[in-house]
Image: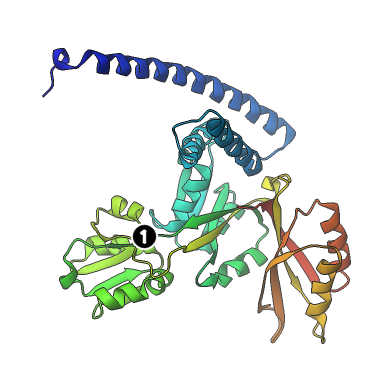
Amino acid sequence: MMMPSDIPADLSHWRDQIDALDDQLLLLLQQRAKCALEVGEIKKRSGLPFHDPAREKLIYAKLRQKQADLGGILPPEAITAIYREIISACRAAEHPAKVAFLGPAGTNTQEAAAQFFGNAVEFLPCATPDEACHEVASNNADYAVIAIENSIHGLVVANLDILAHTNLTICAEIELNIHHCLLSNCELGRIGAVYSHEQGLAQCRGWLQNHLPNAARIPVTSTARGAEMAAQEDGTAAISSALAANIYGVQIAARNIEDLSGNKTRFFVVGANDKAPAPSGRDKTSLTFLTPHKPGALVDVLGVFSRHGVNISMIQSRPSRQQAWEYRFFADISGHRGDEKLQLALEELSGHTVSYKIIGSYPEA
């Protein structure tokens, strides 16, 4: 063990410098938190939402640019990560937030929530995305985070249905890079079953066929639930995240076992209507609509957006659940519902649909 007298003088000098800078940083953080409290009071008096994702995106972009201009040592993603936690802590000083997500702890949904909100929030694990949204509708949570689309397997249509039938609004979207790990506390040769969410199993099908061809593949409600089960059952494994491995005490037997690189999942942050964000200048609007049961009805709707120069980035049909063979459409379009161009398009849209509903306008991820 190194004694204090053995520490080189130059090392002591730089450690003293770091300690002094940490003291200054702590004072500045206290001042920033006090400013955040004042902002919180103004928002409360004005009835504004406490969380402003567009403002936070601008802060991250500005700080990354300043770092680059200074020739900084830290990479841009480190600046974002550091300030995400600073902003999260200051936001918690304004208004402690509770965020519902598909549990148990350690799911990709929780990882997405932490990527967006930081870790200075209260995470509320729920059994289903429907339950997570219900917690918000019942005022037991401020926000819910739900998966909406995977870059390989497409839309999570059941979650679209939830949004169509709840009085909640989309406040933001999150894109999360998905990397799967094989978690197990036994050797590969002893693994007889692999637990994961059905999408996790599907996204690692090739790896499983090559390395565990005889193991049963058992779908469960979430990747984290799989990790929890693998921690409790000998001779089993799970496809889950490194976060879940740490939470449940399971060894990482293999990393990045997904068959295709570039696997991403898109999540929505949903909240009550009073939490709808202001325009950011680069927004999306999600809506759902029913068309009359007649030839060309959908073409008429698409023509409305085309005439007004509004781009449709996604469209999906689902059974309306109201009448046999009647279909509800979901669409993501460019722009904010407050934009004049989009308002004109929506006014015309009402004449070509049985009904339509805006699910939210929010900053692009």
Q: Decide if residue 102 is in sight here.
A: no
Residue 22 falls left or right of residue 143: left
Vertical placement of 88 versus 221: above or below? above
Q: Residues within 10 Å of mark 1 (few under 14, many from 20)?
A: many
Outermost residue to the left = 1
Q: Residue at x 45, y 16 (%)?
A: 24
Vertical placement of 27 versus 55: above or below? above
> Where residue 268 sits in the image (x, y, percent)?
58, 57
Q: Nearer the viewer, residue 171 or 211?
A: 211
Residue 157 falls left or right of residue 210: right
Q: Residue at x 55, y 24 (%)?
A: 32
Which coloring applies here?
rainbow
> Where residue 212 sits in the image (x, y, percent)?
25, 75
Q: Residue at x 55, y 71 (%)?
A: 154
Q: Decide if residue 330 is in sight here.
A: yes
Q: Quadrant of residue 160?
A: bottom right
Residue 352 falls left or right of residue 211: right
Q: Quadrant of residue 306?
A: bottom right
Residue under label 1, please give it.
224
> Where residue 1 sits in the image (x, y, percent)?
11, 24
Q: Nearer the viewer, residue 247 or 154?
A: 154
> Where residue 329 sits in the image (x, y, percent)?
70, 73
> Which SS class for mark 1?
helix
Q: Nearer the viewer, residue 351 or 174?
A: 174
Q: Nearer the viewer, residue 353 or 7?
A: 7
Residue 347 falls left or right of residue 45: right
Count the numbered circles shown: 1
Q: Amino acid at mark 1?
A: Ala
Q: Quadrant of residue 217?
A: bottom left
Q: Residue at x 71, y 45 (%)?
A: 280
